[in-house]
Amino acid sequence: MHVIDTVRNWVYAASVKGRFQIWHRWSGVVLQAVLFLTPWIVVAGHPAFQIDIEGRRLYALGGVFTPTDTILLVLMGLFTAFGLFLFTAIYGRLWCGYACPQTVFLEEWVRPIELWLEGERGVRMARDKGPWTFDKTWRKLAKWTAFLAISIVVSMSFVSWFAGARALWTGAAEGWYYWVTAFFTALMFWDLAWFREQFCNFLCPYARFQGVLCDDASLVVSYDAARGEPRGTEGACIDCKKCVAVCPQGIDIRTGFQLECISCARCVDACQIVMDKKGQPNLITYNTLSGEQRIVRPRTVAYTTLLTVIAVGFFTVLFTRPTVDGLVSRTPGSTYTVDADGYIRNTYLLRLTSHQNEARTWAVKIDGLPADAQVIVPPITLDGAATTTVPLVVRVPAAELTAQSVPMQVVVDSGNGTLSMKATFLSAGG
């Protein structure tokens, strides 16, 4: 386990090629396409994915979710969490090695830039130990400039999920979005230029609880000590330390399973190159601590059951929710008012939330009151999925009222479905 020190223990990861690094490249391309392209893709008139903070809406693949859909958002969060639990129980930390944004940006941008500008591991180590010369200075400045450019583009793309890509990139977004972008830019630059693997070792919560999610049947990167030891003599391991040199976490996989290991398989590819030359099987592979991978076991069955229940609940709620939600509440601090013409006035607030993208105009009527009751409400038009609150005034002749509280129904009609909400009309009674 690493111990935080005041002196940065820098990790110089050597470059390596192999089949798992090709998988890294493809997973990185796909995930970066999601980050950079999703904000620009329009589905049903809205971004494919956007968290509209000001409008209090979530757009996802043509669906629109509002604060009244809290249960759906909770179910989505639970499904994501338990899905990750199940994936980890079976495949270990493959998420960290192939899909985590931290790993993707380090592998696809940082390490290639360092290799291009500063050279291989040994050259970088020797230069960093030496004095600040012109050669060292311009290389560092060029590298940090590249990291800053990456940080700006990534931060802009991330904030586009909230502000909207077209508005943000054209300067039309609210000013505070650009302050948020600047904050994330500074944070990411600090991470790429200095913090790096320390995030995985010290800050990432997933690294802390993955030890609980994994067991002896989970897939991990492991070293075949039975064949490899003793190193350099009778064992197959020649102690070349290439597996250590390429490790982005700065660990030696030969000492056993460690929480710092992110299962990126760089050591697997490095060892494969050496063992191929010897004509022997690889000493470092994806395996389980027990030597047998059993997908069906109590924890995976429990996670699968929970995921099934959550998925059924999500789609049941999704397909049975009304096209519009509403709430009628009495204006705070009011009961009723007697107007000069003898009518009793009650004032309410009517809040409507549409879950559909098309624009609609809503009509309001009251059931349960005398026929000559008057309903005063401004025109209600929602341009797609949105929420609006309007005043609703109901007037009834005092002579028509015989009770102090009369139950009524506020009916909202869009021409394509109705919504009925319970309320009460108050008066002095007969």
Image (cartoon, grey):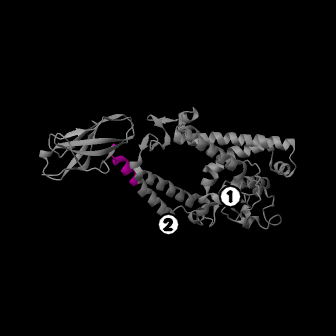
Q: Indicate the position of residue 206 as horizontal and vertical percent values.
A: 59, 59
Viewport quadrant of the N terminus: bottom right
Q: For the point 61% across and 55% down, which residue is it?
A: 94
Q: Is residue 63 left or right of residue 160?
A: left
Instruction: Name the residue that disc number 1 marks.
Output: 285
Residue 6 visible here: yes
**Amino acid type for the residue under numbered disc 2:** Pro
The front one of 178 and 251 is: 178
Q: Mark on residue 265?
A: none
- Say which of 156 and 39 sits in front: 156
* Chief secondary structure of the magenta portion: helix
Q: Is residue 257 positioned above or below 383 on the image?
A: below
- Which badge, 1 or 2, comes first in the chain's sequence? 1
Frontmost residue, 70 versus 27 = 70
Does the segment drawn in magenta span residue 321? yes
Tell me the crowding category of disc 1: few under 14, some 14 to 19, or many 20 or more residues within 10 angstroms, Cα based: some
The amino acid on which the numbered mark 1 sits, given as a three-letter code, is Thr
Which image quarter: residue 8? bottom right
Identify the residue at horizontal 77%, vertical 44% (top origin).
115
Q: Position of residue 12 (x, y in %)?
A: 77, 52
Front position among marks 1 and 2 = 2
Q: Tell me the magenta residue range.
A: 312-323
Left or right side of 170 for 11: right
What's the residue at 23%, 42% (across, down)?
Answer: 394
Decide if residue 35 is in sight here. no
- Number of labels in the image equals 2
Q: Which residue is mark 2?
A: 298
